[in-house]
């Protein structure tokens, strides 16, 4: 990253966190192998361009996502998290994405309660055929997180 | 201390043009654990792989990161390179800097370079937590279960059995043969259906490697690929098949008459019956719903006339168990019920029949001796109206899909009508003619030329009665006018639809089905005969509407899959599966409920060392677990982890950048 982070762990939104001029958010993308990861590969093969802020982690199924992963991301490295899985009914593991969805909603409530803006973490269904959709989702999430500003405190340019 | 080697690929210009590869290598070298980092034009090439192998040995690497294309592309290739150098293949991680960076940020080299470095950092961090994993080998039971004895099931069973693999063929009706046994002649060649089918049916009965269980249904399936156990209900037939010779004395004398399903209810069969003369096995069964002996204890004629003493009114359903390694589902199709088409007067007008009824009428061995007749008065019809797409391609009243074969068999029906009733005339209401297939278009043309049938493009909108005729109203889109045709008989080409109980069967087998009840293949293009559940395959119309050639082709494809599965004595399985740590497991069994494959059972272990008291913990069946990770995330005690995607590996990735 370009700007040096001086306070890594900021657990909740703080209005005083000012974005340095060249600030770019980091978005952790947690994608299931069979649909969304394959979809993101297709975005690549089709050379569809999207903002470079997302860092993708591959997991077998969205049901593998432990809320811990989301919280840890926000606490340490990311300004936002995108979890993406197969469409309802298309889960490679039959029903995994339903569990994921339910767990995700609860996690989101918790984060909200703690003080995170609800757009910090987002969920989407992207199939292996939806390269364009993946690019759109990333663009939207990036835009949302940019609006929300950084989760970390950065060293001022002149200090 | 970890010693990670990083290999960054230019992928020719694919990565090289959009990412500053040398800068990425320099960045990687700054990571504490990275002992070796290098770039190369094509890491997947032979010299590229050699570079990895050499570095593993010379640099004593403890894990390897390849930054290149998607792991879905070359993970296998690089894992193999690791094995070849004597390293555990699961110590590899791939940083996807092509699909996820160079190809999607082509206008921002700086960002793509920075992102690529981040992706490498994440992969390095993950790889440090990688563990050595070993492919699991599971024993296989080399026996296949085929469910459904239509042409698809028959073909699959024969192909598998010819490879000297034992097959258990379960058919719910008293005879195998399926719908094909009910057909007269078949498009596109007009061979007689029975003539090409019955030899195959006989082969099934006499094949040393096939165990035929007619009048039976699968009621339970346990286990996992290579090691399933099926419970099969053998419905009571009240006839001892071992002694029965199929002479027919019983059904000749039986006084109870019941609509004959095989002939679509056009004529009657007896309460003790064999569905058709060429049935396999050619042994009768007693229909318990109608037999007066079984209902009221009165009659008993069949037992009296049977010289072999084969009738046994006390017979009970029997449950048998078979151990098998693979399952082929070939349960075929049913015809869609056209009740929603009220404007056709279905059910009100006797002289409206469906395509299978027509097929039975024109069959030489059918209930009307091979000529179509009007159900109302038994007269031979002159003007016959065929209506295609009844239910098919009709989102409003029917179903969205095209049943695929109705255009073809309707063309066939016009020909058969023409052959059987010389002075007849056929009218066909159609939407499009879909005749894709070898010799199909030619067949439709031939039928049209030979019969002179009048094809009217459009949906029939209404049928009403005028005297003893039916008037069919519809639009002929070609002339843009409403037309009305006087018909003696109307034949509806109703949609091909799955059996009502197909979803129940799917649930019992643990496989998925679509919104209509057709069983779902694992991949519509690349895995068309497999289901998402390992070891369960599909053939024929149970997956989607098909004609006979396609059903047979799919059945043979399925057989090849089954034979492939049984090629060795054991099967290799991906080691990326879940494991329970007994120390932490509290026995809550949340994981048991969440596992989509029922892979988790419980076991009793001593409370602690030296204790006699027991406590319950979860236990994962290696053979069944597919590695989704649902259980890992649900476990509150953090007692489960998923090899290859452990909490540690993922958290390492998260905190790496
Ligand atoms: C009117 C009409 C005319 C046709 N004409 C032609 C033609 O000329 N040429 C052509 O190529 N195709 C034709 N077809 C298509 C042809 O009938 C099918 O392609 C073929 O029968 C499909 O075979 P199948 O084995 O998949 O299914 P089916 O023939 O339906 O066989 C399925 C079998 O599985 C059994 N079964 C069902 N459920 C269970 C269960 N739960 N447990 C155990 N057993 C079960 C059934 O009893 C049946 O025996 C025609 C179809 C129709 C409707
Ligand atoms: S969820 Fe965890 S603690 Fe509960 S039974 Fe399963 S492994 Fe044991
Ligand atoms: S990883 Fe998935 S398939 Fe394996 S035991 Fe856990 S829930 Fe079942």
Image (cartoon, coloured by chain):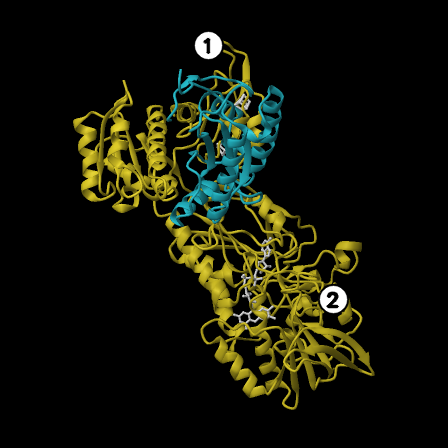
Chain colours: A cyan, B yellow
Whether A122 is drawn above or below B497: the answer is: above
In the current view of this chain or complex, which residue is farthest to the top?
B610
Q: Residue B347 or B653: which is nearer the viewer?
A: B653
Q: Residue B424 or A42: which is nearer the viewer?
A: A42
Quick check: is the Cβ at mark 2 less than 8 Å away from ligand 1?
no
Position of residue B80 in the picture relative to residue B199 (left or right): left
x 54%, y 28%: residue = A148
Residue B161 in percent (x, y) is at 42, 56
Q: Residue beneath label 2, please?
A: B341
Q: Residue beneath label 1, please?
A: B609
- Residue B571 visible to the viewer: no
Look at discs 1 and 2 and give the one toward the viewer.
Answer: 2
**Quadrant that contains the N terminus of chain B:** top left
Whether B604 is drawn above or below B437: the answer is: above
Quick check: is the Cβ at mark 1 less than 8 Å away from ligand 2?
no
Residue B578 in percent (x, y) is at 45, 29
Q: Mark 2 falls on what kind of element?
A: loop
Q: Mark 1 falls on what kind of element?
A: loop
x 35%, y 26%: residue = B130
> For residue B106, what is the image quadrant?
top left
Chain letter belonging to callout 1: B
Chain letter belonging to callout 2: B
Position of residue B3 in the picture relative to residue B254 (left or right): left
Residue B313 in percent (x, y) is at 70, 53
CA distance separating discs 1 and 2: 72 Å
> For residue B413, what is the image quadrant?
bottom right
> What mark, if any, has residue B629 been given in the picture?
none
Whether B445 is drawn above or below B335: the answer is: below
Residue B605 in percent (x, y) is at 50, 18
Few, some or many residues within 10 Å of mark 1 (<14, 14–19, 20+): few
In the current view of this chain or complex, which residue is farthest to the bottom?
B423
């Amino acid at each position: 990253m370009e700007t040096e982070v001086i306070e890594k762990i900021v657990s909740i939104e703080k209005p005083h966190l000012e974005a340095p001029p060249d600030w770019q958010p980091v978005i952790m993308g947690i994608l299931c192998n069979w649909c969304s990861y394959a979809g993101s590969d297709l975005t690549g093969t089709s050379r569809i361009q999207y903002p470079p802020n997302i860092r993708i982690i591959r997991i077998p199924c969205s049901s593998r996502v432990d809320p811990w992963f989301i919280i840890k991301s926000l606490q340490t490295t990311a300004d936002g998290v995108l979890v993406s899985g197969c469409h309802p009914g298309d889960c490679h593991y039959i029903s995994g994405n339903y569990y994921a969805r339910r767990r995700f909603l609860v996690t989101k409530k918790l984060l909200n309660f703690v003080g995170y803006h609800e757009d910090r973490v987002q969920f989407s269904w992207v199939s292996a055929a939806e390269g364009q959709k993946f690019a759109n989702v990333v663009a939207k999430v990036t835009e949302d997180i940019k609006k929300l500003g950084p989760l970390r405190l950065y060293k001022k340019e002149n200090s | 201390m970890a010693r990670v080697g990083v290999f960054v690929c230019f992928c020719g210009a694919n990565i090289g043009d959009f990412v500053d590869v040398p800068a990425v290598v320099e960045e990687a070298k700054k990571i504490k654990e990275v002992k070796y980092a290098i770039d190369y034009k094509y890491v997947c090439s032979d010299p590229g792989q050699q570079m990895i192998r050499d570095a593993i040995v010379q640099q004593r690497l403890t894990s390897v990161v390849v930054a290149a294309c998607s792991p879905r592309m070359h993970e296998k290739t690089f894992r193999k390179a690791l094995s070849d150098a004597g390293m555990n293949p699961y110590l590899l991680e791939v940083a996807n800097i092509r699909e996820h960076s160079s190809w999607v940020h082509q206008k921002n080299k700086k960002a793509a370079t920075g992102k690529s470095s981040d992706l490498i950092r994440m992969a390095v961090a993950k790889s440090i937590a990688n563990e050595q994993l070993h492919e699991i080998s599971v024993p296989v039971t080399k026996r296949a279960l085929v469910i459904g004895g239509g042409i698809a099931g028959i073909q699959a069973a024969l192909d598998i059995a010819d490879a000297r693999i034992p097959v258990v063929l379960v058919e719910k009706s008293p005879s195998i043969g399926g719908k094909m046994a009910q057909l007269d002649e078949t498009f596109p060649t007009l061979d007689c259906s029975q003539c090409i089918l019955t030899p195959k049916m006989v082969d099934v009965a006499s094949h040393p490697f096939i165990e035929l269980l007619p009048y039976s249904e699968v009621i339970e399936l346990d286990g996992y690929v290579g090691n399933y156990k099926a419970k099969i209900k053998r419905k009571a037939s009240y006839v001892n098949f071992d002694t029965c010779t199929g002479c027919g004395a019983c059904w000749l004398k039986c006084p109870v008459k019941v609509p004959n399903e095989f002939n679509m209810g056009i004529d009657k069969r007896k309460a003790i019956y064999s569905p058709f003369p060429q049935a396999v096995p050619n042994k009768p069964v007693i229909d318990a719903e109608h037999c007066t002996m079984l209902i009221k204890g009165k009659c008993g004629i069949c037992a009296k006339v049977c010289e072999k003493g084969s009738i046994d009114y006390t017979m009970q359903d029997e449950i048998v168990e078979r151990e098998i390694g693979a399952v082929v589902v070939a349960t075929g199709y049913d015809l869609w019920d056209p009740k929603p088409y009220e404007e056709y007067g279905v059910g009100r007008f006797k002289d409206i029949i469906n395509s299978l009824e027509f097929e039975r009428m024109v069959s030489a061995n059918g209930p009307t001796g091979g000529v179509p007749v009007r159900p109302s008065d038994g007269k031979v019809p002159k003007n016959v109206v065929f209506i295609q797409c009844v239910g098919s391609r009709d989102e409003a009243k029917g179903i969205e899909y095209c049943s695929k074969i109705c255009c073809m068999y309707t063309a066939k029906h016009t020909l058969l009508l023409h052959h059987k009733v010389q002075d007849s005339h056929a009218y066909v209401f159609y939407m499009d003619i879909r005749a894709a297939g070898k010799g199909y278009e030619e067949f439709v043309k031939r039928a049209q030329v030979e019969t002179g049938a009048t094809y009217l493009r459009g949906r029939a909108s209404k049928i009403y009665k005028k005297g003893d005729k039916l008037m069919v109203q519809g639009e002929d889109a070609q002339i843009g006018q409403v037309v009305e045709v006087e018909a003696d008989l109307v034949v509806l080409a109703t949609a091909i639809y799955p059996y009502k109980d197909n979803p129940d069967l799917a649930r019992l087998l643990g496989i998925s089905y679509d919104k209509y009840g057709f069983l779902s293949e694992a991949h519509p293009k690349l895995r068309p005969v497999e289901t998402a559940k390992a070891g369960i395959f599909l053939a024929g119309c149970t997956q989607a509407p098909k004609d006979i050639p396609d059903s047979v082709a799919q059945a043979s494809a399925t057989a090849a899959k089954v034979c492939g599965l049984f090629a060795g004595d054991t099967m290799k399985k991906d080691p990326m599966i879940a494991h329970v740590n007994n120390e932490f497991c509290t026995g809550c069994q949340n994981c048991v409920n969440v596992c989509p494959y029922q892979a988790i059972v419980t076991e009793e272990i001593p409370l602690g060392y030296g204790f006699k008291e027991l406590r319950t913990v979860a236990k994962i069946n290696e053979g069944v677990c597919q590695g989704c990770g649902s259980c890992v995330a649900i476990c509150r005690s953090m007692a489960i982890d998923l090899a290859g995607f452990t909490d540690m590996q993922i958290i390492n990735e998260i905190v790496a950048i």
